[in-house]
Amino acid sequence: MQLTDKTGSWARPLQLLKENRKLLKDDFLSGLTVALALIPESIAFAFVAGVSPILSLQTAVIIGFVAAVFSGRPGMISSSTAAISVVIASLVATHGLEYLFATVVLMGIIQISIGLLKLGKYARIIPYPVMLGFLNGLSILIFLSQWDLFKINQVTTINGSEVVQNTWLPGPQLALMLGFVAFTMLVIHFFPKLTKAVPSSLVAIIIMTIIAVVLGRFGIHLQNVQDFAGMEISGGLPRFHIPMVPLTFETLQIIFPYALIGGLVGLSEAVLTLQVIDEMTNTRGRTNKEIIAQGTANLVNGFFGGMGGDAMIGQSIINIKSGGRSRISGLVAASSLMLFIMFGSAFINAIPLAGLVGVMFMVVVSTFKWESLRYKGKVPAQDILVILIVSVITIFADLATAVIVGVIVSALIFAWEKGKVIYANVEQTDETEKTYKINGTIFFGSVLNFKDIFDVESDPQSVVLDLKYAKVSDYSAVEAISSLTKRYEEAGKRFTVIRLSEDCRRMFYNADAFTAVTIEEAENEAIQYPYV
C-alpha cells in the first residue's frame, strides 16, 4: 500500500495527510512496536555472531532503513538475523571484524547481481519440505549457540602458566540463570493473553532487568550485557568505514564462501518472508526488487561497519498484524531503534543474559515447525526424508548448502516418481501391425520404464508409436525413441511415430544426430528426421 492523493496531484499536502491519517497512524505505531521488539533480539544475535551488541543494533538500523526505502514488499522488516549470525560466527572468530565488513560488502554485491539478473523467480520453486528442514535446522543451531552464555572464562595455573578455560557457571549461579531463563519464557508465552499492545519479549526483558537491578541491591549479581561484552554499550550514529583488509586474491578466497552462503541464506529468508506477507495481505510483492533492496542494504551496511542481515519473518508478521502496510512502518522502526541506541544505552547495558537467552529460546520454539514431527504416515515418506536431510545439513554444514541439496533431492525424487507414471494402451488390428498409445511424459526419469513397454522380438512386422497423449520433454526421450527405432530395424521390422505435438516435432528436428526416427506427418506421408 502506498500513500496516494485521490485527486492525482501532490499539490495539497494537508488534504493528502488527512486522507491517509489512519494509514500513517497504523504504520507509525506498528513501526514503534517493531523497534521495541528488535532490541532484545538484536543483542542476542550479536552474542551468536561473536560481535559487540552495539554493532548488531546499528546493523538493524541500517539494514532496516535502507531495505525499507528500496523494498519490493512494503511492510517487510529487515534487520540483523540469527541466520546471518550463524553463518559469520566462525569468520569473526578466525579473522576478525574487518574481514566481516568486507564479507558483508561482497554479500551485498552478490545479492544485487542476483536481483539484476532477475533470478529471484527461481527462489519461488523451493519446495515446502525444504523450507521446513531449513527452519528446523536453523532453530536447532540457535538453541545450541545459546549455551555458550552459560559459561565463563576462568584463569587457572597449569605447570606454572596461566591458562584461560571456558567452563560452566558454578552450580548455584547456573541454577539461578536457568530459573530466570524459564521465567522469561513464561512471561513471553502468557503475557499476550493479557494484551498484545506491547511485544511480550520486550515486557519480559523489562521485568528481568528490574529484577536484576533489585537483586543487585542485595548483593546477588546476574551477568548482564555489559559484563558479557566486557565494555559499556553506548551508541551513536553509525560512521562510514572502509574495510581494512588487503585487496588480494587470498582475501577473496577467505571472504567469498561466507559472502556467497550468507547472500543465499539471506535471500532464502527474504523470499520466504515475502511469500508469508503476500498470503497475509492477499497482495503480491516484487521478488527481484526485494532482492536488490536486500543487497543494497547489505552493501551500505558493510561500509558502515555492520554484520549483515536480511528479512525477519517474526518481526514482519508483528508489523503486519499491528497494521503496518507501507514502507513507512519499516522507516519508523529503524529510526526509533536508532533513538533507543543513542539515548537508552543505560537500559541496554543492564539487561541480564538470562533474559536474552529466554528470548532466543522462545525464538527457537516459534521457529521450529513442531507439526513436522507428526508427519509420519500423513505425508509422503520422501517429503519427510527431504526435511531430515535439510535439517541435518543445516546443523553440520551451512544453511545455503542445505537449501541447495534439498532442492536437488526434491527434484530427483519428483523425477523418479513422475517417471513411474507412464503406460501404454496396446492395440493390434491384425497380425501385421501393432500400435502403442503412450500416456505420460517421456523424459530422463521415465525412459527406462518407457523402453520396458515394448516387446521387440514378439511384435509384428509393423509397429506404430502413437504420441498423441504423451509428451516428449527432453533429449533423453528423443534418444530412447531413436534407440527403439534402431532395435526394430535390426529385427527387420518397421517402426513409425505418429501424432506428435508441434514442440515435439521441433525437438526431433533440432536433434539432428538422431536420423533413424520416421515420423508420419499425414496419411501415406512419412518424413525421416532430420529435415534436409
Image (cartoon, grey):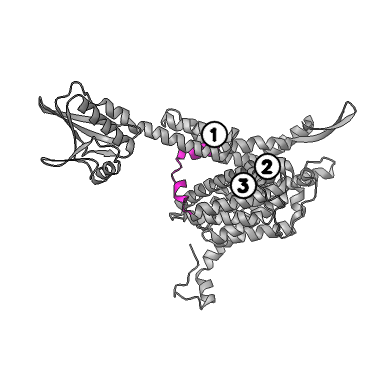
Tell me: 262 left or right of 93: left
Marks 3 and 2 close (CB-CB < 8 Å): no
Mark 1 surroundings within 10 Å by alpha-carbon count, few (fewer than 14), some (14 through 19), many (20 or more): many
Residue 184 visible? The answer is: no
User: What is the crowding at mark 2: few (fewer than 14 residues within 10 Å), some, or many (at least 20)?
Assistant: some
Is most of the magenta stretch helix, strand or loop? helix
Tag of residue 91: 2
Distance CA(mark 3)–CA(mark 2): 16 Å
Q: Magenta segment: does it hold 381?
A: no
Viewer-side label of 3, 2? 2
Q: What residue type is labelled 2?
A: Leu
Residue 509 x %, y %? 26, 43
Q: Tell me where the magenta segment starts and ends, as one range.
A: 117-136
Q: Mark 1 points at which residue?
A: 391
**Is residue 483 positioned above or below 531 on the image?**
above
Circle 1: residue type = Ser
Name the residue carrying label 3. Answer: 81
Residue extending furthest left? Answer: 430
Q: Nearer the viewer, residue 132 or 504?
A: 504
Q: Earlier in the sequence, mark 3 or mark 2?
A: 3
Using the image as rendered, state which of residue 182 and residue 297 is in the foreground: 297
Q: Horizontally, is 91 left or right of 219 in the view?
A: left
Mark 1 or mark 3, which is nearer the start of the sequence? 3
